[in-house]
Image (cartoon, helix red, strand yellow):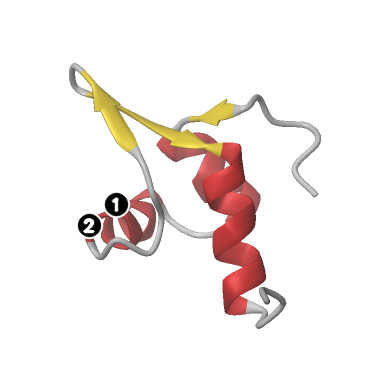
Amino acid sequence: MLNDYRDIMTVFDVAEALDIGKNRVYELMEAGELKAFRIGRIWKIPKRSVEMYILDKANLTS
């Protein structure tokens, strides 16, 4: 699904992959819809978290 991305994605990567703005990525993280963590001032988003978000929104999770 996201084969062109590393296992840990940046806000920019997620915005590009989902074709949304960076601010929307921050909103998703703040709302808890997209699991992420910070190292210093940099947000890191596991690729698995993005995949789960996509599957959930497409109602493909069990």
Q: Are marks 2 and 1 in contact (CB under 8 Å)?
A: yes
Helix, strand or loop status at disc 2 = helix
Expressed as whole percent of the image width and height from the top left, the position of residue 55 reads: 66, 68
Query: Residue 16: which numbered mark, if any?
Result: none
Between 61 and 21, the one nearer to me in the picture: 61
Expressed as whole percent of the image width and height from the top left, the position of residue 61 reads: 66, 73
Q: Determine if residue 46 is in view.
A: yes
Between 18 and 3, the one nearer to me in the picture: 3
Q: Determine if residue 19 is in view.
A: no
Number of the front mark, 2 or 1: 2
Q: Which residue is mark 2?
A: 30
Q: Quadrant of residue 33?
A: bottom left
Mark 2–mark 1 Cα distance, whole angstroms, equals 6 Å
Q: Which residue is mark 1?
A: 26
For disc 2, the neighbor class at 10 Å (few under 14, some 14 to 19, many from 20) is few
Instruction: From this view, report whether residue 61 is shown above or below residue 34.
Output: below
Expressed as whole percent of the image width and height from the top left, the position of residue 22 reads: 38, 49
Instruction: From this view, report whether residue 47 is shown above or below residue 58.
Output: above
Instruction: From this view, report whether residue 17 is shown above or below residue 19.
Output: above
The number of discs equals: 2
Determine whether, in the image, residue 8 is placed left or right of residue 35: right
Determine whether, in the image, residue 2 is placed left or right of residue 20: right
Q: Quadrant of residue 25?
A: bottom left
Residue drawn at (27%, 61%) of the image: 27
Residue drawn at (46%, 31%) of the image: 10
Helix, strand or loop status at disc 1 = helix
Residue drawn at (78%, 32%) of the image: 4
